Image: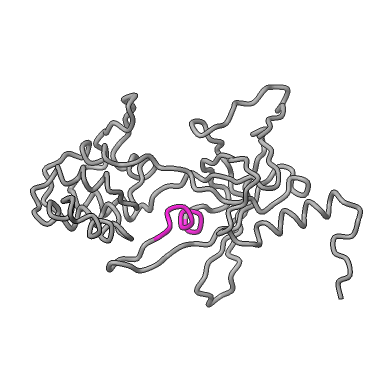
Amino acid sequence: MNHTLVNGEVPATFSRSNPFQAKVIKNVNLNGAGSNKETRHIELTLEGSGLTYKPGDCLGIIPQNDPELVTALLEEMKWDGKTEVVINPQGDTLPLQEALTNHFEITLLSKKIVLQAAKLTDNEELQRLVASENTDQLKEYMNGRDLLDLLRDFGPWKATAQELVSMLRKMLPRLYSIASSMAANPEEVHLTIGAVRYLTHGRVRKGVCSVFVAERLQAGIRFRYLFNPTNIFICRRLKIKISLWWVRGRALHLSAPLFRNVQ
């Protein structure tokens, strides 16, 4: 990742701990009315960042959790969202609602989280589930469930908000292959992202980042992202992402015809 001078000054170094605050230029649904799919085309500005990218780079979006899910957690545990909680070993604090929204993963369970949670309740069913001989049952339970499921299924809890959030993992950026070329859009970066929604265990689930983009990132909004330079494509990404930057870059840089012998 390269940096360029902006107004004669060296810009700040953007990183995982200091992500760039991007502004959304455009966010549109590429699917037609009535489609059961939602694929978003999102355009972001790089203006003022000094950041550049090359074909093969990924962009990491640092999402926010679904506010409805955060509210459900607070209501389930009868927590005050304004309560300050420690979020890291350095002792930094945030209001609980903000911490659950922006800082912690709340949509995925791990064995470590469930084992730690079992120490905070006398629920006999959970104690059986975490027993060493029930590894397969624990794995089956965690599949497709989240923190809200855990709290609803195995109360009552004898834990403070601080004890429970201390179990949680920090929110990680979600990486997406870039679908644009700097040659065609020198101060922009484009992505195509399919919104993930599905029904399981009696609740509608939403992809943390894909639905954050689809439902809450409108034009003019700023949010955090960072680059992950790589020359390795993530095969599960939509092929249109790869083809868009390839076509745009080739069309601008090469004088030779893009396609030959096309009938």
Q: Which residue is drawn at 42% across and 47% down?
A: 64
The quarter in which the N terminus is drawn is: top right
In the image, residue 81 above or below residue 144: above
Q: Position of residue 111 (x, y in %)?
A: 27, 48
Which of the 4 quarters of the picture holds residue 46? top right
In the image, residue 59 above or below residue 91: below
Q: Residue at x 34, y 41 (%)?
A: 169
> Outermost residue toward the top?
9
Q: Position of residue 194 (x, y in %)?
A: 53, 62
Is residue 193 shown left or right of residue 205? right
Q: What stretch is highlighted in magenta?
A: 206-215
Q: Position of residue 164 (x, y in %)?
A: 22, 41
> Outermost residue toward the right?
255
Nearer-the-camera pick, 249 or 95 = 249
Is residue 58 shown left or right of residue 253? left
Q: Which residue is drawn at 33% across and 49% down?
A: 106
The quarter in which the C terminus is drawn is: bottom right
Nearer-the-camera pick, 143 or 72 = 143
Q: Residue at x 74, y 55 (%)?
A: 246
Q: Position of residue 51 (x, y in %)?
A: 66, 35
Magenta residues, dominant SS class: helix
Let me know if residue 211 is in the magenta part. Answer: yes
Let me know if residue 147 is in the magenta part. Answer: no
Is residue 49 shown left or right of residue 154? right
Is residue 218 shown left or right of residue 104? right
